Structures are given as structure tokens and as C-alpha cells.
Amino acid sequence: MELSNVGGLFAALPIVLGTFSTPDEHWYEPADHGILTGTISCPIANGNYNIRVRVFKGGSVKAISNIQPIVIGSTSVIANAGSSQTICGIIPATLSANNASPNTGSWGVLSGPNTSSSQFSSLTNPSAQFTPIGGNGTYNLNWSISNGLCISNSSISITFNPVPIITTQPKDILDCEGHIVSFNVVASGTGLTYLWQRKKPLGSFSDIPVELNVSYPTPGAIRIQNVGNSDAPDGTQYRVIITNSNNCSITSNAVTLNVNEITSINPTTTDVTLCQGANYSYIVTTSYPSNVVSYQWKRWSNPGQWDPVVNGGAISGATTNQLIFTGATPTESGQYKVTVVFHSTGADCNVTSDSRNRVLTVNPLPTCSINGSDDPLATSSTGNIYLAPAGMSAYAWSIAGNYASISGVTSSTATITTGITNNAPFTLNLTITDANGCSSTCSKTVTVNDKQPPTFAPPGPLSFCVENIFSAEYLTTGIKINPDPDYYLFKHGDTSLDLNPATFNDNCCALPNDQFTIRWEIVFSSGETTITGVGQPSAYVISGIPADFKLWGDGITFATRIHRIRYWLKDCNGNEAVVPVEQTITIKPRPKFI
């Protein structure tokens, strides 16, 4: 509002008045006769008012303005700057004053480290952001609402407190299972406190409770023992919340605990029993294979002593992730573990599989043997017995070849029945399994030979009379026979003593009779020289010349003589009965002359 012609001394004086209730009242006394300014508040009610100003100086009126009519037709909005705030750090504060509409609102800084209006993102927006450019401290802000005449003011304070400053962030750590690690943070500020948090894999950050493996040796440090356990597994993240005396906090970077560890040894079976000759292996897996510097498998030798395993014999891979047993023997029986050396954040470290030791037992194979005749078996023979070692839990016999059959295939005794083919080999196989489940196999090659002599029937009965006399002389002393044929003359070509091939019988050799050899002899009961021959008697020869032979009779007492003829028959495989087949030859005498 402008009041002019004040006592003729002041013209066009902008006067902002205080609260008033009558049109004629002393409002303001300036320090000198300069420009008069002030603030007018809304009257107590709407209406028409005549306003004039009396100017005092030294207790006396120096000027009086002309009457200025004004009309108050609307109520002004009462300003509300919102709530005071305390903020940690130099960050924009969002203001929350009331809306000035339909009036005009304006922000201002009453006091603080810096009073520039440029700290507001907007001077007229009740939700403006205030960013202190004067740093930490308390800023008093004013929110003013005006309807053109009436003005309402409201103030708040915003205090910006400092936050702790992290000068050294914690760092990721790589170490070996079972070791001790420490994470450290360095921060500045007053009255600092530290709260460490942890996030396990697949989990979320939470405060670390009191645990035996966790301690805090110095402010800003956390010490973790036995890393790799269930409270500090590989991949666990850590961070720390640092709070100062103003209760302002800052959270450090999240860091990761990486644990070099043996994750498994496969197979996972602790105790394994093998049979000699089996193949087997152990494979160790780790959390970070690329960090591995070396592997060394070890074997228990004495209490507290583990010796390095070396390659050789059945063992290979002693310094790799796979320990291999090829054709294992009882010598390899024992307890095994592995030591793995890793790269880490500091010096190289190692992990030993003490909690995953493996016990390997290699049982010897049973000694397989087949006990029985080493001589060839006879064709068409039965009851040929072969024995396996006693005390086994299982037996399995078999035959390879077509010249024999077997019974008792699951017992310790096998009985063989042979075929009829001469000089026919077969292989007798045996597998035995002992109480440990270990098996071994052996075999024996057996030949089937014809050992059975042929059978036959001798001719007979054989009976001959002595030869006829040629002449006789009757003398006083008796009768003289001339000549005196006291024998039966068996002539070459006579078949009466021959064997009949139709009676030949052999298990292996077939007819005709040229596959058989005949041998014979005639033993005389009267003591004459024995006659022997090869072939049929009808083909008897002497020095290659066909010959006859005599079958002696009795020309003295004229008794009947009985001789024996013996036959041997040899088959095509050389089998000949030890005891010959005999037949008697009866030689009858001629009548006696009396």
C-alpha cells in the first residue's frame, strides 16, 4: 500500500503496516525521516478501512499522512513451514510447507552458515529441496505466504550433522579352510562405534551374533577363525556400519570371504574293499581349482606319520587330483588322504583332507588249482574226478571242447565223462570265489586217448586128430609106425585157428580189421617149443616164407593132449589187453595097436 502526501514531507512512501483495528492509529516511528517500511498483518475482520500514518520524532508528531482507504475482502492463508529436521551428511533436504494457493509463498534463509537463497531448488515451491552450501550446521528457514496485503510467516530449522568418513575400505580375502582371517576398516569421526554384518550365500545381511569364532581385536577390525565352517562358508560377504556421536552412520563396501577348500573326495565311501587286480581311483575336488598350486596324496604309516605316495607299481597320479590304482594288490591296502596347496591373498596355504580320509583294503585272490590226473583220459570213460581247493564260498566248473561232459559244476569236485574221439583235447576251467568275494580262475588241458583194448571172441572149440599113419610093420617086438606122425600138421592157409573179425569190438577204432593187429602163441602142454606169430595163424611165416607148424599129439600113451592158443588184439590206437584171450586146442591120438 502506498501512502502519499504525508504532512507534505513525504510522498509515495511504501508503508507496510502492523496489525491495526481503527483507521487512525500510530503505527511506526522511523529512526529518521527516511523511507518508511513495515509489515502489515491482516485485520481482525473483513471490511473497509481508512488508513493514515502519523510520524513521530522525539515524542512529537512530525507528519501525518493523508487518509488512504483500503478494502480487506479475503482472509490470508496462515503459513506452515513444516517440521524441523536433523539430517546426516550434506544431502538435499526435502521441505514440506503448506500450499500458498491462491496466495503467494516464498522461502528464505533467516540464519545459518550460509543465507543465500540459491540453496533452494525453488523459492516458491512448498516442497522445494534445500541443499546447504555452507556445510554442516543449523539453518533457520522461513516460509512466507502473502495475499498482496497480508503476510503470514512460519520458520523451521534444519540441522546437517557430519557422517563418519571411511578412509580405508575393507578388502576381499582369499584364504584356506580352517585358517584365521581379519577384515579391517579405517574411518574418521567422533565417538565412532562399529557394527559388523554378514551375508551367507543365498542369504541376506544381518548383524553377526556372539560366536566363538568371531572376535573384534581393535576398533574397525573383525577376526574370524576356522573359515570354511558353517558360520563362515566360502562366498560369505561382510560389511560394517559405522556410527558417530551424532548418531549418523555410514556403511562400508561389502567384501567377500573366498575359502580355498576341499569340497569332496569321490567316491565318498570311507572304507572300500577290493580284490587283487581291481582298478580304482580317488578324485579330489576343490572350491577354486585355478588356485591350486600342487597336490600330494599321502598314506598312513605310523601313528602321526603320513608318508607321501609315489608313483610306481599299481599307483599313478600321486601328485594330481586323481590317485589311480591299476591292478591293485594287497600292498596298496592302507589309509589315504591328500594335501592341496593353494594361492591365497597372502602366502600360499594348504588344506589336508583329514576329515575325509579314505581306507582301501585289497584282498588277495584265492589260489586256484585243479587237482586230478595229468595223464590222458580214456575214451568213453566215466568217474574221472578233479578237485578244487577246499573252503571256497563258490565254485564254477566248465569245459571248453566237445570231447567231454561235466557234472558237479558248483561243487569242489567235478566228475568228467569223456567222449569216443581219440587224442581229443578239452580244457577244464574252474573259477573259485573265497569268503571275501574275490575270485580267481584256472584251467587244465586234458587229452582224451583211447586206452581201452578191443574185445573179440576166439575160434573154437578147437579139436584135431593126429595125422594118419603112412605104414606099419608088425614085428616080434611090436608094431613099427613108419613114419610116426604124433602131431596134427597145421598147414599154411588153414583158417581154423584164425580170429573172426566179426567178433572184434572197440570203443574207438572202426572196422575193417586192417586197423587191428593180431598176435598169438601156442603153448604146448607136452613142453614142445612155443609157436608165436603175428597176424592170423593161417598166414604163419618163417623168415618171410609161408610155413606149416605141428600141433603135437601123444604117440606113446595115446592120450589126448590139450594145448593152449593165446590171442592178443591191438586196436588202431595201440591198445592191447595185458591178459590174452585163450582157447584150448585138443589133439586126439590115433588108436593104439595091441
Image (cartoon, grey):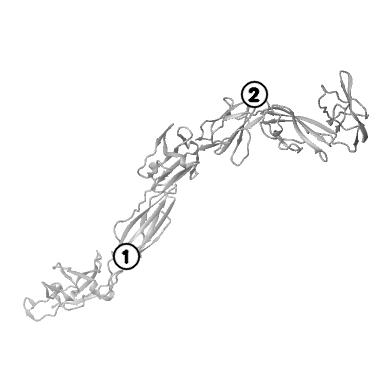
Q: Quadrant of the N terminus?
A: top right
Q: Amino acid at mark 2?
A: Gly
Q: Can residue 208 be seen from the camera position used here?
A: no
Residue 316 image position (x, y, % from top left): 38, 44
- Report the Cα–Cα distance between label 1 and label 2: 110 Å
Foreground: 581 or 328? 328
- Residue 224 position within the rendered picture, expressed as x and y whole percent measured from the top left: 55, 31
Residue farthest along the front direction in this orientation? 8
The residue beneath circle 1 is 379
Pick the quarter of the image with the C terminus. bottom left
**Does dot 1 land on a helix, a strand or a loop?**
loop
Residue 439: image x %, image y %?
41, 51
Residue linked to disc 2: 191
Residue drawn where x is 37% and y is 57% of the image: 429
Against 582, residue 389 (above or below) is above
The image shows a total of numbered marks equal to 2
Q: Is residue 54 above or below residue 206?
A: above
In this view, the residue farthest toward the bottom is 471
Q: SS class of the residue under badge 2? A: loop
The reply, left or right, for residue 377 in relation to residue 563 is: right
Say if mark 1 contacts mark 2, CB within 8 Å.
no
Residue 575, position in %: x, y?
25, 65
Depth check, front residue: 458 or 302: 302
Residue 77 as seen in the image, left or right of residue 437: right
Which residue is farthest top?
Answer: 58
Circle 1 or circle 2, nearest the eye: 2
Other residues around mark 1 within 10 Å, as few (<14) / some (14–19) / many (≥20): many
Mark sitting earlier along the chain (1/2): 2
